[in-house]
Amino acid sequence: QVNLVESGGGSVQAGGSLRLSCTDFGYQLEYYAIAWVRQAPGKDREAVSCITNKARDTYYLDSVKGRFTFSRNNAEGTVQLRMNNLKAEDTAIYYCAVGRPILSSLRQVSSYGYWGQGTKVDVSS
């Protein structure tokens, strides 16, 4: 059974960096596509970055391209989201989620059925 735990959130100033990690303590990660999804106050959840189970395809939200990097290590059951040059608009709760979407649905939040508890990222300008 999937058991996702995120870590690495915090408060930084604009221009700073954070690295979010997500570990699956159910050791099922290799079978799933993974998404980092964020929800800012008063806004809907949006997929920030998604990666297929063998990392052949990766999606990034336009506003984070060139700043965020998503990596996965199936052997260790972990994924990371490296976030550089953070902006105030990146402030949100970030969730790790897994699912088995078809490729055309990789970026759809509804494609992911297992979620972690979320980790808060606060970027001050």
Image (tube, rainbow, N blue to C red):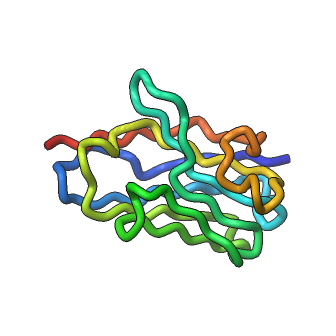
Query: Vertically, is 34 above or below 94?
Result: below
**Residue in view at x 56 percent, y 71 percent:** 71
Q: Eyeballing the image, is 4 above or below 32?
A: above
69 relative position to 124: left or right? right
The quadrant of the rendering that contains the C terminus is top left
Q: Residue at x 63, y 53 (%)?
A: 35
Q: Nearer the viewer, residue 4 or 17?
A: 17
Instruction: Give x and y (percent) for residue 105.
Output: 75, 52
In the rendering, at what x and y percent does residue 29 appear?
76, 61
57 vs 31, nearest the viewer: 57
- Residue 23: x, y in percent? 63, 56
Q: Residue furthest top?
A: 42
Number of numbered labels in the structure image:
0
Question: Which quadrant would residue 52 be assigned to in this image?
Answer: bottom right
Q: Is residue 67 left or right of residue 27?
A: left
Q: Looking at the image, which residue is at 83% across and 58% down?
A: 102
Question: What x and y, as percent, mark residue 91?
Answer: 33, 40
In depth, the one of 74 and 38 nearer the eye is: 38
In this picture, residue 57 sits left or right of residue 26: left
